[in-house]
Amino acid sequence: MSKQPAPAHRTGMSLGVGVVGVLAGLLFATNASLFASDSERQPVDLEGLLRAEDARLAETNAQVLALQSEVEDLLAEQGGADPADGLNTPMELAAARSAVSGAGVTVSLTDSPLIHDIPEEFDADDLLVHQQDLEAVINALWAGGAEAVSVQGHRLGPLSDVRCVGNVLLVDGSTYSPPYVISAIGDAQELRAGLDDSHAVRVYREWVERARLGYSVEDEDSLEMRRYQGGLSMEYARIPGDEPITWNPAAAGGDE
């Protein structure tokens, strides 16, 4: 059977692509530790290694959050050295440094069920949610006037990093798997208009119809999002063609 004309092409790294290649590299990199001690054997199968590394990453993330909280408490004791101190309400909201609640929308993206038995006219990549698809929805929601956005319940801040490694979604170091849930606080009608006006989202929706990718938008009467847990300070900046410069908060504030 010949292939049907395809809608606009979706490129980019896949969130649902198999992890064999990534884990194989990791397996080689950790080979020495796997056999270094019989008393501390690590899983030698790919699935076991993935579970072990995911658990280790989750533990590390929990430690980071605990340390961040401790640092904020210590800075508060020293009299407002936290970069978030002194922000007015609009800036706090823009920096995601305060918890928020309100009405909005929730968008869900899922892989196609056809991935388990791929039809002849598709490649496996056609049936998976890509990083660019999540970015398209997030950007469309911001363009639609979102006051706050979360991915899998993780509040996005000004320095948040949303990317994929193999079939794992990383959001500020936390790992997630599909289905992907993106929520936004704001006027539901304007948020929906932002989604409808986005060319990238329209391309994804063409593949929803063609390849049965999952896509749904639900109005929410009440959403709650805690404050952004990441840092705010940018350590380096570069003007094109110039050397990198380092920002010194003390010098910027006039402290000697």
Image (cartoon, grey):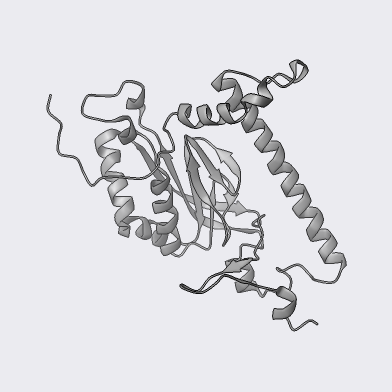
In the depicted structure, whether residue 117 falls above or below residue 146: above
Furthest toward the top, the residue is 38
Give the x, y percent position of residue 235.
64, 66
In the depicted structure, whether residue 247 falls above or below residue 201: below
Foreground pick, 213 / 37: 37
Give the x, y percent position of residue 148.
54, 59
Foreground pick, 247 / 99: 247
In the depicted structure, whether residue 183 falls above or below residue 59: below
Residue at the image point whose x is 31% and y is 59% from the top:
197
Q: In which quarter of the image is the C terminus?
A: bottom right
Counting the numbered discs, the total is 0
- Can the viewer see residue 96? yes
Furthest toward the right, the residue is 77
Residue at the image point whose x is 12% and y is 24% from the top:
1
In the depicted structure, whether residue 55 falls above or below residue 64: above
Left or right: where 232 falls relative to 222: right
Foreground pick, 49 / 154: 49
Give the x, y percent position of residue 18.
44, 28
Residue at the image point whose x is 26% and y is 38% from the top:
209
- Can the viewer see residue 188? no
Residue at the image point whose x is 54% and y is 43% from the top:
170
Left or right: where 235 falls relative to 140: right
Question: In which image quadrant can residue 198 be found?
Answer: bottom left
